[in-house]
């Protein structure tokens, strides 16, 4: 009787271990770690820019031609592309314009730190004086000057 009870308990213990081992590995996602670079970041990170708080002040010149001082707050946001995660990612952007009348627009840079899901937001002030036409600033050309961190890409099953 003791042998039968021992065998039953041993069988139950082995069965429990097998079930627990099966549960712990099921649903676990494995990732490839890829270092982000200026060349590959756009495969994993979407970047959006826009302006708010546009203000313009009209000025009259001695020549009779009107000009404007324009100020705005620029924003840069990031989001992830696809089913990826991020670790320790920071991006530094520089900004410029392709529209000639805005080339002297005062722009700095913008540094962003992404969360695990790839979301971030940064803002920058921009100001231009003596613009000959009233127009909101165009979308800036964003250039990544520095990027650090890792993207985690799920391995294929």
Image (spheres, helix red, strand yellow):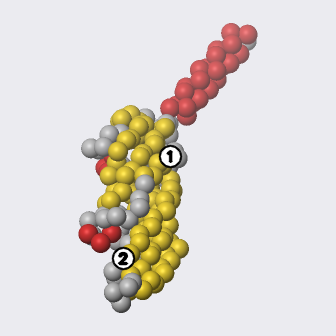
Q: Left or right? Give the position of 17 relative to 155.
A: right
- Label ID, residue 80: none
Q: Position of residue 145 (x, y in %)?
A: 35, 45
The residue furthest right is 2
- The crowding category of the residue bearing disc 1, from other C-alpha atoms within 10 Å (few below 14, some 14 to 19, many at least 20), is many
The residue at the point 48 percent across, 70 percent down is 72
Residue occupying the far front of the picture: 62
Q: How far from the left and from the top, in percent, is residue 128?
A: 41, 69
> Which image quarter: residue 91?
top left
Q: Is residue 134 visible?
A: no
Q: Residue at x 49, y 62 (%)?
A: 125
Question: Horizontal placement of 113 versus 68: left or right?
Answer: right
Q: Which residue is label 1 attached to?
A: 113
Residue at 26% in and 65% down: 98
Residue drawn at point x = 50 percent, y = 46 percent: 113
Residue nearest the viewer, comparing 35 with 63: 63
Q: Quadrant of the C terminus?
A: top left
The percent position of residue 19, horizontal first and vertical second, equals 57, 30
Asked if residue 55 lies left or right of residue 34, the reply is right
Residue 131 disc label: 2
Residue 123 visible here: yes
């Amino acid at each position: 009787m003791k042998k039968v009870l021992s065998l039953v308990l041993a069988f139950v213990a082995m069965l429990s271990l097998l079930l627990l081992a099966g549960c712990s590995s099921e649903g676990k996602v494995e990732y490839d770690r890829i270092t982000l670079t200026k060349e590959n970041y756009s495969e994993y990170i979407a970047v959006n820019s826009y302006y708010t708080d546009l203000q313009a002040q009209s000025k009259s010149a001695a020549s009779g031609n009107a000009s404007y001082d324009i100020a705005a707050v620029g924003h840069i946001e990031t989001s992830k592309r696809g089913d990826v995660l991020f670790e320790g990612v920071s991006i530094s952007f520089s900004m410029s314009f392709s529209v000639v009348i805005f080339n002297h627009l005062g722009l700095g840079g913008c540094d962003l730190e992404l969360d695990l899901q790839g979301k971030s937001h940064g803002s920058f002030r921009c100001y231009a004086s003596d613009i000959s036409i009233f127009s909101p600033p165009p979308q800036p050309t964003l250039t990544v000057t520095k990027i650090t961190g890792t993207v985690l890409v799920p391995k294929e099953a």
